[in-house]
Amino acid sequence: MIAGHPAVRASEESFPDESHPLGELAALATRGAKDQVPVGEILEQRWRYELGEIDVDPWKAAHHFVPIHEIDKIVDNEIDPPEIKGTGPVAVAASKLFRHQSVIGRKELLHSALVEASFLAVGIDQVWAELHSYEARGILRRLAGKERTECWTTASIAAAEARLLRAADRSDEHDWFRADALETALANAPHLAEEQAHAVRFSANRDGVAICEAPAGTGKTILTRALVEAAHRSGLKVLGLTPTWVAADELSKSCDIDALAIAKWRYDYVRGQSFTVDANTLIVIDEIASPGLLRRAASASCCRHTARRGPPACFHPTD
């Protein structure tokens, strides 16, 4: 409730005496005497003062409230606009699926489209008509082969796959890590299993891109600490990128490096405000399978074109 609201005033008039049980509860909650609990005009003045200090108009905030997921959607669309333009149920459903998948099947597309149609009060016939329209215009493209006739992708996603492969084609490029720095980092991590130590050596090879794939819980983050130490001892900076801010915080704390959500880094990168990345920066991308093909391709391309030979990148897919 907000100070000055009729319900608040009625409540104050109903219980003017601070000896009421509610007053006693308030006193207990503040661990103070009942006569020290602010009520009435004093409480209202206190609320107005505190709201004024942070420059908040509660009535304006309530009338112009925008859910946080809607704000995220606006920011997200600036970097990754919907794959299919339109407000119909098929366009909305397909765009949501394509954010995390490069190929979508008949069952999941129709299920998602019918869910969106229920929100828009759109019938099944209109869903089918919209789907056939996108197919006829080549916006949704069926994959070749009889066994894949019920799967769709788009031309832009196919192009993104090609960009991703080109950006990752950086074999035998440069000696990024010093041999002594790598061995010292491994010596300082005796807790690593043989397979983990092998993964660290593999990630520190001459290739510009290394992919370290393992199921969840097998210690990819632990071995990343050794890789980060080897990078620092080799004179490299390290930047961590993850699909979410929660994962970024965890990677930052676990490996003691700067870590950002991929969407935030890309948003700043196109505006020239991002973490400075050059040919001496190791980029560790955690859970690379989660962000979706378009973000993976964009991140890899940014890495490739940042410097003449590009910074090294270590991708950690999920299981």
Image (cartoon, rainbow, N blue to C red):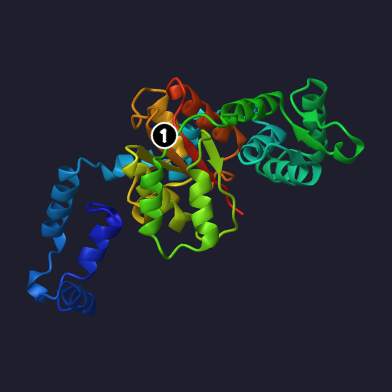
* Front one among 152 and 203: 203
- Seen in the image, is 35 located left or right of residue 104? left
Q: Is residue 169 left or right of residue 4?
A: right
Residue 74 lies, with reference to residue 258, above or below; the image says above
Indicate the secondary structure of the residue bearing disc 1. Answer: helix
Residue at 46 percent of width and 36 percent of height: 263
Query: In which quarter of the view is residue 118 placed?
Result: top right
Outermost residue, right direction? 146
Left or right side of 124 for 168: left
Foreground residue, 154 or 299?
A: 299
Q: Which residue is mark 1?
A: 265
Determine the image quadrant of residue 292.
top right
Residue at image position (45%, 34%) is 175
Quarter that holds the C terminus: bottom right
Write the residue at 30% across / 58% down.
Answer: 7
Q: How many marks?
A: 1
Judge whether residue 290 can be spotted in this image: yes
User: Considering only vertical position in the picture, is 101 above or below 17?
Assistant: above
Residue count near mark 1 (Cα–Cα under 10 Å), binned few <14, some 14–19, many ≥20: some
Residue 264 in the image, given as x and y percentages of width and height: 41, 36
Looking at the rendered structure, the kind of residue marked 1 is Trp
Give residue 217's position: percent from left, percent from top. Answer: 53, 62
Placement of the N terminus among the 4 image quadrants: bottom left
> Which residue is nearer to you in this view: 207 or 41?
207
Residue 123 picture location, percent across and down = 78, 39
Above or below, 267 relative to 239:
above
Residue 246 in view here: no
Q: Position of residue 156 (x, y in %)?
A: 66, 24
Residue depicted at x 9% and y 76%: 33
